[in-house]
Amino acid sequence: MGNMLHTLKEITSFITTFIILVILFTSFAVMFYSLYYLVPFINEKYFVIPFFLVIPFPVLLGFAYGIYAYVWYIFLAITITISVGIFTIFGLRNYIKNLMTSPLSYKTNSVKELSEVFSAVIFLSLVITMIMRVAGVQTPGIGIEKMPLYAQMLQLLHAAFYEEFVVRFLLLGVPVFIWRGISMYRRDGKFLSPLRVFGGHYEMGVPELTFLFISSAIFGLAHTPAWGWWKFLPAFIAGLGMGYLYLKYGMHLSILFHFTTDYMTIPMAMNSQVYLTFGLLFLIIAMAGLVFTVSYSIRILQHFGMMKKEKKITQRYIPPPPWINIKCPNCGGQNFIYLENGKLKCLNCGTVFEPEYREQYDQSAPEENPP
């Protein structure tokens, strides 16, 4: 039963990963086109980018207008490009290699986790929103779809990076880096690599979980002034998902999560066929999210000791008896009578001798997973 569920999860993961990659790289291509598309609108009224400080509600710091907003947009496009490059080189290449050699393997990497976490977050967000609507809670949007397309491009690409910098980097990455850095120095007298401040390779210990929940709660609160209080829980769950990816794989993956979520609406707004296609793909992702919600729920319960981990079926090498290769020193025969004093008597020639047993194999050979 467990293998069947695992196979179902891996097939679902492959489907959602393919869909996420289609949406991600389509949005990425449109982002490059937008660099040309935006130029004629630089002096328009809505060609502006706001900058906020989140403490925990957004506090406006100022605006970038015109050419300054466009330069910032170029910088944002560069950060997305770098993130896609890291994702492709260190994630997608290994994912394709593993897929070719072992399609239903237990291995996880950034590509699989991006698609699975994304699907689970979308599923939970839709379920929460539907429950609120059934309960009579109003769930209004902020009307960004009514803004000119160039303004949507500015706002959504800005959110994909700036919100990750303010929330994930400053409120999650920096505190965890300081905590872990001090702990390492006290224990080993060594300094933590400065690159770890950008996330990746962290275990889900006390400091990681503490700042993950704090930063996600702040992320949820930051969305309430514009969206209303109904948005807190969906944004909080999204913050948990992006924070988890940040801690495990790095800031580039949380940025790509945010970019895929927000910027996918741009190609949808530009073409009706893309709108229908992405809408259908989004529905498939949401349905697949149920599988990954169950999967991650089990992992969370196991992590906190509330559910026992499934024991792996292991194979252990059992060495042969030490006497199977013993030969009579006189005639070379291999048929003996075992005497009480530990000696052997050859049945061919009657020679009595004390055998030299070969060394035993290591009984504690490492366990291996079944193929």
Image (cartoon, helix red, strand yellow):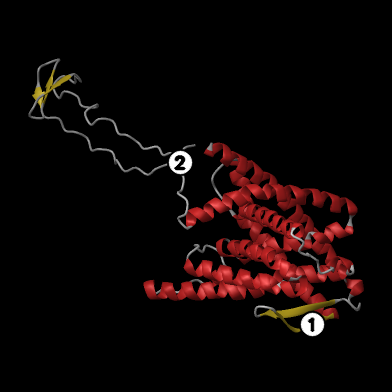
Determine crowd level at label 2: few under 14, some 14-19, many 20+ residues with C-alpha closer than 10 A.
Answer: few
Identify the element where label 1 is drawn.
Answer: strand
* Left or right relative to 111: residue 331: left
Q: Going 80% across and 48% down the picture, which residue do you hit?
A: 280
Residue bearing the label numbered 1? 63
Residue 156 visible (yes or no)? yes
- Which residue, given by chain and number where applicable, does mark 2 sit on? 369
How far across and how far down the image is residue 345, in percent? 11, 21
Is label 2 in a helix, a strand or a loop?
A: loop
Q: Residue at x 69, y 68 (%)?
A: 232
Q: Is residue 12 left or right of residue 158?
A: left
Q: Residue furthest top?
A: 348
Residue 366 horizontal/vertical position (percent) = 37, 44
Q: Which of the 4 image quadrants contains residue 195?
A: bottom right
Q: Residue 311 appears at what percent x and percent y?
A: 43, 43
Q: Is residue 249 left or right of residue 149?
A: left
Q: Is residue 68 positioned above or below 31 on the image?
A: below
The answer for how far apart the CA atoms under marks 2 and 1 are is 56 Å
Q: Residues within 10 Å of mark 1 (few under 14, many from 20)?
A: few
Q: Is residue 37 visible?
A: no
Q: Amino acid at mark 1?
A: Phe
Amino acid on which the number 2 mark rests in the picture: Asn
- Residue 28 vertical placement versus 277 (above, below): below
Q: Relative to the observer, which residue lies in front, 18 or 81?
A: 18
Residue at the (80%, 71%) spot, across then down: 155
Q: In the image, residue 288 lies at what x, y percent?
A: 68, 47
**Towards the viewer: 208 or 346:** 208
Q: Residue at x 56, y 53 (%)?
A: 297
